[in-house]
Image (cartoon, rainbow, N blue to C red):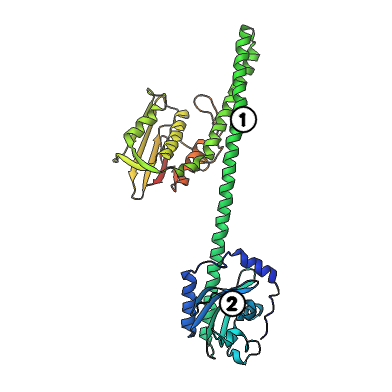
Amino acid sequence: MVVPDKHEREKERLKSLESYSILDSLPEKDYDDLTTIAAEICGTPISLVTLVDENRQWFKSHHGVNITETPIEYAFCSHTISSSEKIFIVNDSREDERFHDNPLVTHSPHVIFYAGVPLINHEGLPLGTLCVIDHKPRNLNERQITSLKALASQVMNLLELRKNKNDLEKALKIVQENNFELERFAYIAAHDLKSPLNNISALTGILRDSMGSEISDETQQIISHIESSSDKLKTLIDALLNYSKATQVVKHTKTDVDLTNLRNELSGLFKFKDNFNFRVLSSLSTITVNKIAIDQILLNLIANAIKYSDKDIVKIDLHITDQGDRYEFHFIDNGPGFTNEKLDKAFDIFETFNTVDKYGRSGNGIGLAIVKKTIESLGGTIYIDSEHKGGAKFVFTLEK
């Protein structure tokens, strides 16, 4: 018996094999189907998907035998992966000096005929084989050889899919951990920043009160500047926190939302009873959605419509229709709307278009970004209807 040589890039090969996280995994039907087909095409009682590690050949699939591994020094597949051949064939192992006294030949499973195709990954490294085995001498015709090679390619595709899935899961875990750390950092930073900002606001108030009539116009202007800057920074911090938490609404369950109550609740949150007209127009009486999400979406859209309105009376109509597996919302206001140049960037975070609201305050460009992030986190879509005239029209969907 001849012990097979190690592959010329053995260390790299073993490291690559380990990256697939497949050794000692449970049986899988996809692999078993391929060995069944290989045995049927080649007319052999045994077909295996083998993976060769440092000390053994392990069978991911074993059609026709019950054993799951053999020592590497007995493995025909070790010869296959150390060979440069695209298929390694032994017609009669009893007449081959490399195998005639191999325990796998002289004892069960009595490997007399063997044909193995190496499973080669994109790095050019063989991980194992797809092989067929018989208890008697035989040959494979060209069609059988071509089919066996094609099936080996499918085995390799399954292995690559598995590796890609594992890599994606690891990457997702890292992203989730990073997101958690970022949220934690944002919370701590916001708390640490807001405390001194509150102190600044309080101190400026004390300074103004203590100086009384002695305060000069210039000093008064400086103090007002400090207060407005502090307030703006606190508002920005709160908005950034809300943006970072936008995807967390996915964790909340969906509930039945009464549309009349929704309209009343949202209207009551704004102190514009005389010049704010908000209507919910729908043939539905309730919708089943994430209540936290719909509140967050509509609050931001309504706040924007009010702040940037150029009309004496702010009018907002919310149309809701049932689209089978989702609800479609048309949010329409009577404000100035969007120019074509602004449509593409309307949902970009920090995009403010250098405008101020009707109270003279500049926006932070986060409100619409929160809306978009929230909707997309729930599997929905949103866009601004560019064809609509006489205000802004947002069209968005939410899954039921």
Which residue ends up furthest to the bottom in the rendered image?
A: 95
Image check: 25 left or right of 336? right
Q: Earlier in the sequence, mark 1 or mark 2?
A: 2
Residue drawn 43% across and 38% down? 292
Residue at numbered disc 1: 193
Point out residue 260 in the picture as x, y percentages from the top left corner.
32, 34
In the rendered view, would you say 121 is above or below 349?
Answer: below
Distance of mark 1 from mark 2, alpha carbons? Answer: 64 Å
Residue lying at 58% horizontally and 79% vertically, measured from the top left: 117
Is residue 365 visible from the viewing direction of this image? no
**Callout 1 amino acid:** Leu
Please name whichever residue, 149 or 13, is drawn nearer the observer in this view of the structure.
Answer: 13
Q: Are marks 1 and 2 in contact (CB under 8 Å)?
A: no
Left or right: 56 with respect to 276?
A: right
Q: Position of residue 124 (x, y in %)?
A: 64, 71
Pick the quarter of the image with the N terminus. Answer: bottom right
Say the numbered circle drawn on residue 371: none
Q: Does 265 sit above or below residue 170?
A: above
Instruction: Judge from the rendering whether residue 240 lies leftward or rightward of residue 333; answer left or right.
Output: right
Circle number at residue 70: 2
**Extreme right residue here?**
8
Q: Residue type at mark 2?
A: Thr
